Structures are given as C-alpha cells and as structure tokens.
Amino acid sequence: MLKRVLLLVVSVTLLAPMPGCIEPAPPKPGKKVVKVSVQPVYSLHIMSQKYSPLIRYLSRETGYDIRVVSAMSYENYLPTLEANQVHIGIQNPLAYITLVKTRGAYPLLKMVHRDGSTSYRGVIITRKGSGVNQIGDLKGKKVAAASRRAVGGFIGQVAICRDNGINVDRDCLLSLVETQDNAIDSVYRGEAEAGFVREDTLSIVRERTDLSKLNIIGYTDYFPTWCVAAFENTAPEVATEITKALLNLDWGESEDREILEAIGIAGFTQASDSDYTIIREKMDALNIPY
C-alpha cells in the first residue's frame, strides 16, 4: 500500500508543471493550433524569461492558438519535436541541419544581433587561479559543457582545441551539464577547471555571477545565428504568418523592443539553407555525424 501511495505522489509530481517552464495557454475554441518549440540552451527559468513575451506576441499577432512544446535539454530537443509534430522550431544551426534530414526542415528567418550581425561565437572560460591559462593547459582537466550538440558551446571549442593539439574526448574529462548557464556555474564554483559556452551567455548570468573571477582563454569561429524553421508538416500559411509576424517586430517600437530585448537580439531577417553550409563543413571536418 505504501509503495502505491509513493508511486501516486511521484506520478502527480511529474505531471505537474515545472517551475520556469513556458506553458501553453488553455485551448482556444475555433483557433488553429500551432506548436512552437525553442531549443533549451539555458535553464527553464531563463528560457521562460527570454521567450514568453515572444510567444504572447505571436499568439496576438497571428490569431493562432500557440502551444509551446518545451524540451528539457539539448539532448531531447529533437525527439521532442518529432514526438509532438511541432510546426515551428527555433534552434541552433546544428539542430537545424539535422532537422533538414529528419523532418524536412526549411529556414524561415535567422536572428539579428543588436550590432546588426547575424553570427555568434563561443568561448573557453576558466576560473582565475585555476592554473589553466591557455588551451594547452586543458589536458587532464575537467571541462563543463551543456551538450555535444551545442555549436557555440561545444563544436566550436572542439575545433580550436584540435587546432591546438587537444583531443577533448581523449585529453579532457568532459562533464555535460545540460545548459550553458550551468557550465558557467560549474567553472565559477570550481567544480570544473574550464567551460565551453556561448560568448553571450556571460552577459546573461552577469547579475548572479562575478565575471571578474573568470578568464577567457579561447574564442571559436563565428557561426550563423539561430534559425526559425518550418517542417514538412507545417501548413504553408502558418509558415507565412509566423514569418510576417516576426519580421514586423520593430526595434523602434517600445513594445516590440521589450520582446526583442528579452531574447537578446534586435530582430529577425530572411534566412536561406546556404547560410548553414559552414556548419555542415565544420561537422564533416571534425568527422562528427549529424
């Protein structure tokens, strides 16, 4: 009897909404349901803060019943999209080129940074006083990263480590910690001697982390920004309306600027599949399947 009670408690707990998760609104009679998912590069709390304003905007602007499908980590993002037949995905370049193969993904838009650029890069961070002052010092050291599928938080760093004679899998002790803010926390607390993260993640954790205690010992190449993609199962009119709504976001309008600032970008611009050729080339050069 006791086991049954405990099982019931666990089941109810798992079914309850998780704190920080972007939850779908209640069903709206007569409105077309559109499922949207955002790759979870940060913790659920941060992801909710960054993307909830955008989801509300899309619901209002398109008139669709927007349902957010929240994946828990990099690793289960692709299976989550497949299991839920998501219509619109917002993801990093590696996830996009994989989804081209698995779900017939095609690009709608890519993100534009505040300086007008459409690229980003990763960094290798260490804690000051750790004795890791250059890439060659990483041998035998514990390295924290969110996922092997992070472009600016793993793939780029693997490439520059290789150029410096370091094989991350053979020469380092890799610790996968699910999110990029977790990777920074691991280095900051001394749980790992180095971390692979996106450069812009540092500004996101600035309020809770004393960045003066961290060093940057390496920078990756620049990669194309995140892609908003549709899939084989996406109705053409849905792709069109979502694209139009995102392009209508105007940095000069205060309400729109708040939405864009939450994400950390200045807007969206048209994307093409050829924008992501560099990612395919990088994966092939590293002999990593995708």
Image: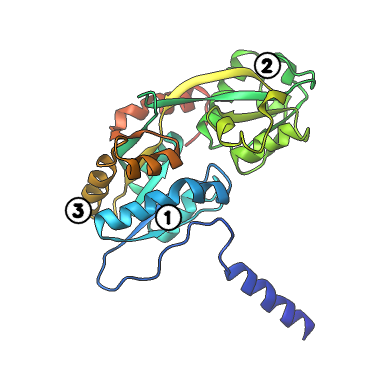
- State left or right for residue 32 relative to residue 84: left
Quickly name the residue at label 2: 135
Report how far apart the C-alphas of labels 1 and 3 lie in the structure: 21 Å
Residue 164 occupies quadrant: top right
Q: Nearer the viewer, residue 174 or 256?
A: 256
Q: Label 2 crowding class (10 Å Cα cut-off): few <14, some 14-19, many 20+?
A: some
Q: Position of residue 102 (x, y in %)?
A: 39, 46
User: Is the C-beta separation of discs 1 and 2 under 8 Å?
Assistant: no
Mark 3 is on which residue type?
Glu
Quickly name the residue at label 1: 82
Residue, far front: 254
Q: Secondary structure at mark 3?
A: helix
Question: How are the residues colored?
Answer: rainbow
Q: Secondary structure at mark 2?
A: helix
Q: Secondary structure at mark 1?
A: helix
Quarter of the image with the N terminus is: bottom right
Mark 2 is on which residue type?
Ile
Q: Nearer the viewer, residue 63 or 2?
A: 63
Residue 181 occupies quadrant: top right
Residue 199 occupies quadrant: top right
Report how far apart the C-alphas of labels 1 and 2 lie in the structure: 38 Å
Mark 1 is on which residue type?
Glu
Q: Position of residue 245 (x, y in %)?
A: 26, 47
